[in-house]
Amino acid sequence: MAYPVHLDVKPKVKGFFDPATNTISYVVKDPASDACAIVDSVMDIDYAAGRISYTHADEIIAYVRSEGLKVEWLIETHVHADHLSAAPYIQEKLGGKLGIGRNITVVQDTFGKIFNEGTKFQRDGSQFDRLFDDGDIYSVGEMACVAIHTPGHTPACMTHVMGDAAFVGDTLFMPDGGSARADFPGGDAGTLYDSIQKVLALPDETRLFMCHDYAPNGREIRWETTVGEERKHNIHVGGGKAKEEFVKYRTERDATLGMPKLIIPSLQVNMKAGALPEPEDNGMRYLKVPIGAL
Ligand SMILES: [Fe+2]
């Protein structure tokens, strides 16, 4: 399937790097209007202290206000396991619809069981305003956008193409970073390879924006590349690397990786569209730690 990419529409893309989780959040502005989308926001958490704050989100909010932008969409490329989303906080302040991939329901089902959520927790994605299917077209102002289902890292991963810019989530890293792990529940290395091929089939000039960068080999943090660069130089899939070779490498590498520091709070909160648990009768909110489940 060929996805429509509008190379002549060049949104202004402003990245906000979060050093605590190596995540990049984006504000994407329609060139023809004041409309914008915010992709993958981050809420700050001091997990050891049980304290949350919104420094990173406030920086984004200040930028949106200073540029006079109107938020139409808050996009989550996937249910992140390494940071908590600030989407509800930003939505309350700036508006916009919150969207994620349709397969959020699969993620909700899997982790609803792991966290032993009761029947009050709906596993139908209804906590979000929009569930995207593969190939869904939507707009930010006058800018045409398309959602591409790119599972493998997680079942709900989507790549969002806005004009000539694609937000790949954890489908790819920068060429010298390779690809994201595929060993979380519902992840699959072969599926990830197939999804990466969908992104690499976009036009060479398509700008690609990463969700993470870990500054490999001590270089500075970078988050923007192109399809052409990834296709030629990505260390895991570039130069036409075969699927079997990728799957073998990815599987062996994933077996050596520990769980992300914030996976427990991140999944519990992000599968509910960023909502914190309801306060208990003493007014405090609590997160659960399942012992031995991950
Ligand atoms: Fe991720």
Image (cartoon, helix red, strand yellow):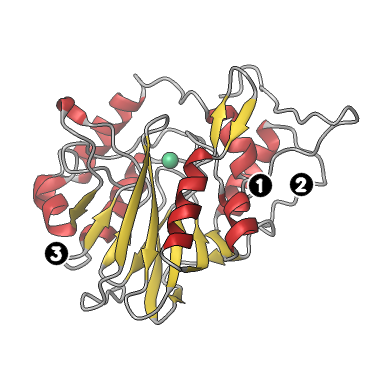
For discs 2 and 1, the disc positioned in front in the rendered view: 1
Give 185 or 210, whichever is nearer the viewer: 210
Mark 3 or 2 closer to N-term?
2
Mark 2 or 1 closer to N-term?
2
Mark 3 or 1 closer to N-term?
3
Q: Say if residue 119 shows up in the picture.
A: yes
Q: Residues within 10 Å of mark 2 (few under 14, many from 20)?
A: some
Q: CA distance from mark 3 to mark 2?
A: 42 Å
Q: CA distance from mark 2 to mark 1?
A: 8 Å
Residue annotated with mark 1: 272
Residue annotated with mark 3: 204
In this rendering, is residue 114 above or below 38? Answer: above
Residue 121 disc label: 2
Q: Amino acid at mark 3?
A: Asp
Q: Position of residue 199 (x, y in %)?
A: 27, 59
Give 73 or 258, whichever is nearer the viewer: 73
